[in-house]
Amino acid sequence: MPALCSTVRDLEKLAKDDVSSLALLGRSVMHDNALTSRILRVANSAIYNKGINPVSTVSRAAVVLGFDTIRNICITAKLLTNLLESHHLTESVYKRLLKLMAQSFQAAMLARMMMNDRDESLREEVFIASLLYRIGESAFWSMGGEITELLDKKLLATDDQVEQNSLIRAELGTSFTQLTQSVARSWGLGEVLIKSLAQPNERMPEIRCIFLADKLSDVVSQPVINTEELHKYLSQAANMLDISVAEFTEKFIDCSNITHKLAIEYGAKAIVSYLPHTADVLEHADAPVKPLLIRQSNQGYQLTKLRQLTHYAVVKTDFNQIIHTTLEGILTGVGVDRCGVLLLSPSRKLLRPRVMLGDNIDLLKQAFVIELDKPQSVFTQCVQQKKSIWVNAPTESECKVQINDVLVERFSSNGFLLAPLAVGTKVLGVFYADRDGSIRPFAQEDFDSFTHFSELANVCFGTSMT
């Protein structure tokens, strides 16, 4: 890792020297024969070199392919070489590292492919940002030692992602994402990487590509494929590129085949067996691709449900009936992808899902167990201050209350709505709604309607309890 850090910093210095950067680049890697060999092998591969004549020097390769491309080939080669040489690790930890390297390399190639219509410098920046998207985690596992072996054993004992995140934070006092953010800032790895880590929900094409490429690579790398997750991200990627899911799938398969070949050119044969054969994965992921159901705001339906709730406020009504009517109004009337009610535990330290409606609610029920142990959490604020909250995006700077990255992984990256569920002055839980599947932003009118439903529901709860 220190050697890689040094290489990255040297290359960043060269990037600022337009006059002598090519000559300096050649000299800076000449002393490393293995690195030079890998750079030239990759530069002469069919993927990069579209000409007839092969290049024989690093500086010539930079002239032909561009400095940004060669710089990123150099960083990639150095990263793969350094991590592959971590022979001091136990077999289990080394295997975990290889899987992580393969996933990162696959994500980098996929993100680059998704930016195919952009200029070369931006494509290369997206490639390197995707490759280094999990550099903090890679650095941890490559360190070796008792702490890595202990955490590895604990992670192998559970498949639950939420539980794994909790184990990581308990052992390290931080998350892998935060480690990566620190490394990215310390090494000066570029604004695209830093922004993609801090604001993964950002709608800029390059940030969205990095996020989706990482998610797709993660899903297809799992021993058991979550078909719902796979088709969700395939649909989102296809929508972003404005092509059909079938067309994107073909591009994904082609990119996967190229990734296998390029890994060999980089001298990283050890990760090839961990690169998924995407064609086989997609063939066996035979769950039908459901057409994306986009529920548009329906004021007529809202009015119908609000009238029902107004009637409930006059006539005592069952608690569960009030909840279902409210959630139906939010789901179909406000037009969200999923919504639900989370109730406080007896200790008032946890929020647990009670009723969920909409898309992929099984996943929602599994993930939404929220600890109220942090005063800055939007959920804590919602309960304590008894106010509705519109989280425009979980990690954006304009969000009044930040939530940590472990929580962010559970929620819609496109933002969500919260409102207290209360009987009189006592808060019993919260209403939640998002548009996770359709990736649509909320407007002020949506937030106002959501708040209206929750407030009227609370009036009904008060009537039913008296």
Image (cartoon, rainbow, N blue to C red):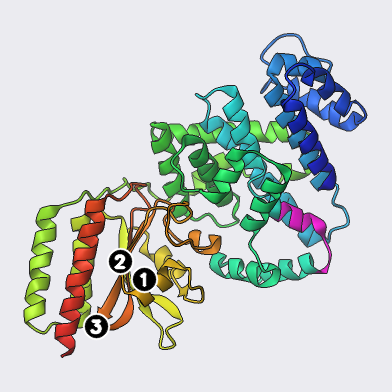
Q: Quadrant of residue 19?
A: top right
Q: Is residue 255 magenta?
A: no
Tell me the CA gap for discs 3 and 1. 15 Å
Q: Nearer the viewer, residue 402 or 94?
A: 402
Describe the element under mark 1 as helix, strand or loop.
helix
Q: Which mark is residue 423?
A: 3
Q: Which residue is mark 2?
A: 388
Describe the element under mark 2 as helix, strand or loop.
loop
The answer to whether one can see residue 328 in this image is: no
Q: Which residue is mark 1?
A: 382
Residue 241 position (above or below residue 157): above
Tell me the CA gap for discs 2 and 3. 15 Å
Residue at the (27%, 48%) spot, across then down: 294
Q: Nearer the viewer, residue 344 or 282?
A: 344
Describe the element under mark 3 as helix, strand or loop.
strand
Range of residues picked out in magenta: 137-146
